[in-house]
């Protein structure tokens, strides 16, 4: 619960923690971890990890098209585009995807549902193969969401960095 003080609208403070239940606290923790994962301190490592995954997935048609799923993923794909150079193919919202292979990118998520929704959208646009990767997606690795052929974890955290367990 966000409380704005009447005297200073720029000052915000969180209500006491007993108001926030465990599910909301978990969501906030995952969002905070995503913000940290795409901070200047860790973004380069995650971008390099994404480029490495794309390189391993190279086929006769080149690297897969990289489709960001979420706000943090858009920042990550932007950084990976700089690191990966001309080989990295970020999704063009105006382009065609018929016959393409796509790598869905998510940073942190409490479920694989965003990947499942993006996979359904990609298949509707004519994508032939949908792959996915992420730093922390609850439930993955495990049973893959419908329409996703494979999942690749992005491991760019150092031993001193916090991960959501």
Image (cartoon, grey):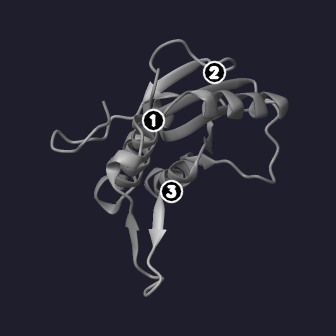
Q: Which residue is mark 3?
A: 75
Q: Which of marks 2 and 1 precedes in the sequence?
A: 1
- Foreground disc of the pair 1, 3: 1
* N-terminal-most mark, 1 or 3: 1
Identify the residue under disc 1.
Answer: 23
Residue found at x 52% / y 57%: 78
Disc on res. 47: none
Q: Which residue is mark 2?
A: 148
Quadrant of the drawing holding the C terminus:
top left
Image location of residue 31, percent across then percent down: 44, 48
Q: Residue 105's spot in the image, x, y percent?
A: 55, 39
- Looking at the rendered image, the disc whose residue lies closer to the viewer, 1 or 2, is 1
Q: Position of residue 136 (x, y in %)?
A: 41, 33
Asked whether the viewer can see residue 45, the reply is yes
Q: Who comes first in sequence, dot 2 or dot 3?
A: 3
Marks counted in the figure total 3
């Amino acid at each position: 619960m966000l409380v704005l003080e009447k005297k200073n609208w720029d000052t915000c403070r969180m209500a006491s923690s007993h108001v926030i239940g465990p599910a909301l606290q978990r969501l906030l923790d995952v969002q905070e971890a995503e913000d940290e994962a795409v901070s200047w301190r860790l973004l380069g490592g995650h971008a390099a990890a994404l480029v490495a995954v794309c390189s391993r997935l190279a086929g006769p048609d080149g690297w897969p098209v990289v489709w960001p799923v979420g706000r943090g993923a858009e920042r990550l794909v932007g950084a990976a585009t700089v690191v990966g150079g001309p080989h990295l193919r970020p999704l063009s919202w105006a382009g065609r995807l018929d016959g393409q292979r796509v790598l869905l990118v998510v940073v942190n998520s409490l479920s694989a549902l965003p990947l499942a929704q993006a996979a359904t959208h990609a298949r509707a646009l004519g994508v032939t193969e949908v792959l996915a990767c992420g730093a922390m997606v609850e439930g993955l690795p495990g049973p893959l969401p419908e329409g996703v052929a494979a999942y690749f974890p992005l491991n760019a955290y150092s031993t001193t960095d916090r991960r959501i367990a």
